[in-house]
Amino acid sequence: MEKTPVKKTSKKDTKQLILDGFKTYVLEHGAEPKSIFKFTKDLKMKEEEFYTFFTSFESVKSAIWVSIYDSTLQAVESQEVFKEYSAREKFLSFLFTWIEELKKNRSYLLSLYEDKSKSFKGLPADAREFKEKFKDFAGEIVLEGKETQEIASRPIISDKYDEALWLQVLFVFRYWLDDRSPRFEKTDAAIEKSVNLAFDLMGKSALDSFLDFAKFLYQNK
Amino acid sequence: MAGKVKEQEAIPVSKVQRAAKFISTGAKVGGNYVKHYAKKMVNPSLDKEVLHQSNAEDIYNSLSQLKGSALKVAQMMSMDKNLLPRAYQDKFTMAQYSAPPLSYPLVVKTFQRYFGKTPEQMFDTFTRSAVNAASIGQVHQATLNGKTLAVKIQYPGVADSVSSDLKLVRPFALRLLNMNEKELDHYMEEVEERLVEETDYHLEVERSQEISAACAHIPNLRFPKYYHEFSAERVITMDWIAGKHIKEWMETNPSQELKNQIGQALWDFYHHQVHNLKQVHADPHPGNFIVQEDGVLGIIDFGCVKVIPEDFYQGYFSLIKKDLAVKEEELNKIFYSLDFISDKDTPEEKTYFKGVFKEMISLLGKPFHVDRFDFSDDSYFEQIFQLGDRISNDKMFKKSRQARGSRHGLYINRTYFGLYNLLNQLQAEVITTKPEWLK
């Protein structure tokens, strides 16, 4: 894992070497390497060295997602204004920055996930670790939103908000992959629009008052 | 929630979403007509103004959500007051001031994309929310080294959606402006060209600097300084011009002398551009002018600049010669060259249109026929509106199979209508200067 302290600098380098090597291979061949043996041979390292860090190509892909997420979070949190943002703005800021990070890897991501039927199977598995980390982040945003009354607490449903935000992340990713507008400006607009919808739905609305009223009538019949 | 102007309300971006927006408006407008006729059965004296009023509201609501070029068209329609029923005008004038702003994270992102820095890193202070919304962008206030700056940021995707937006606006424009299709296409082409230019902020900075330098000698005018280093494709930074919009300023009851002073500055500004520079700030809507405390007129936003081709200029402005109406032959030649009439017209069409255009010219040229003109004269404007109403309802115009008037005329007309309207708002009396060759 990224977080574990690295004992020797060379270890970190090997890991990065594998990640970069994998990306390069996918970029050049449009597909994953055939076998770990072949892959490590091309990188001029022993196969067992690969297993010190990863168990399979799946875990390599997973690590790439996580590294994108980590650099996004780092970039977002380095902005001073981020702390002052409302929950909605924080999430917006995250997505905008994330798209920027994705952009650096667009070709790699396109060759792996452009095909919808294949990515339908592959993406959830590859992004599982990223999802866990993201849900921690989303959970914090939701919690903060609840404190500031930006997000309404509702029984059962509000526990699933982090899951909903994850679906939104997937939506933005898909939208971005298909986006052909210059500078992905359409994706920017899609992010604004969808995040607004999500936060409007999570916020206190007429529906809450309606349910409250219905409950009152039912209980006092 | 609906109808509330809220931050971060994004532009409906895909064509389908936009189309849906328009369809729902169309349905509402249709509904208004049904309501109107139902009411009319009960109360035959019902005025069409009421119908126009509710139509204007529904159309405005949908246009303001679309922002971008659709809003621009609404503005333009509100400019050409002579073309629009009264009730639409007021509603559309609102479009010139308010549109919902974009979220701050997107502003930050835009900055990072073009400058690699956040607004906070570039300026000493930077307002988190927009202080002003323009049709295709929003304005934030910033300070740097003690200077107050205005930073205009363009909405993402606006440049791309210009032409698809205009296609969507088409049926509405057709309905509202009472034009025939040929004429509208003629109009739309020119509009599209200008709008695409307007999304190019590099060009805007360039032109702003050019025109403001060329107009620097005119008294009582002020132009903001533009900052290249803080401007990019989607961002323009300029000096903040403090002051009041004309409407607000008029509420402070300025003296007639001051009103004339501002009016004269405005007139001189346009005179110099049209007759000497041959390119003109073609967006004289009230939001682009700011009256400052010392009685100086600040001019902002050079997004829409129309370059006037020489041959068009000659023909168009020779029309304002006072004695021209008498010289039938010369007039005919100009009418042909400006595409007012062509050989495709039947003889009676020719006579009819010539008559109408002559009337129009003598009316619109009126300020040029005297040395001083009092623009506070509402009856003059009433005449223009009436003529516009009459023309737009005239069968001969609707039947006409071809567009009338050179396309260059669209923006020049718009500029002069805008100028007249502003001067009327100012209640100013100005010395209506003319170029040498027209005297």
Image (tube, rainbow, N blue to C red):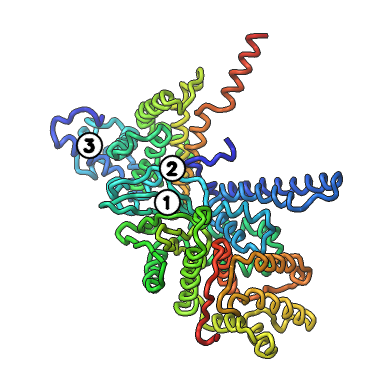
Instruction: Please tell me in which quadrant of the rendered image residue B369 appears.
Output: bottom right
Callout 1 and callout 3 share a chain: no
Q: How far apart are marks 2 and 3 (CA)?
A: 39 Å
Residue beneath the point at 28% across and 47% down: B124
Instruction: Say which residue label 2 marks.
Output: B103
Q: Residue at x 65, y 89 (%)?
A: B330
Q: In this view, does A155 lie to the left or right of B167?
A: left
Question: Answer yes or no: do the residues labelled 2 and 3 have beta carbons within 8 Å?
Answer: no
Q: For the residues carrying marks 1 and 2, which lies nearer the camera in this image?
A: 1
Mark 3 crowdedness (10 Å alpha carbons): few <14, some 14-19, many ≥20: some
Same subunit, labels 2 and 3: the answer reads: no
**Is residue B180 shown above or below A86?**
below
User: Mark 3 is on which residue type?
Assistant: Lys
Q: Do the residues labelled 1 and 3 touch (CB within 8 Å)?
A: no
Quadrant position of residue A19: top left
Three-letter code for the amino acid on which mark 1 is drawn: Val
Q: Badge 1 is on which residue?
A: B139
Q: How crowded is mark 2: few (under 14 residues within 10 Å), some or many (20 or more)?
A: many
Marks 1 and 2: CB-CB under 8 Å? no
Give the spatial CA distance, label 1 vs label 2: 12 Å
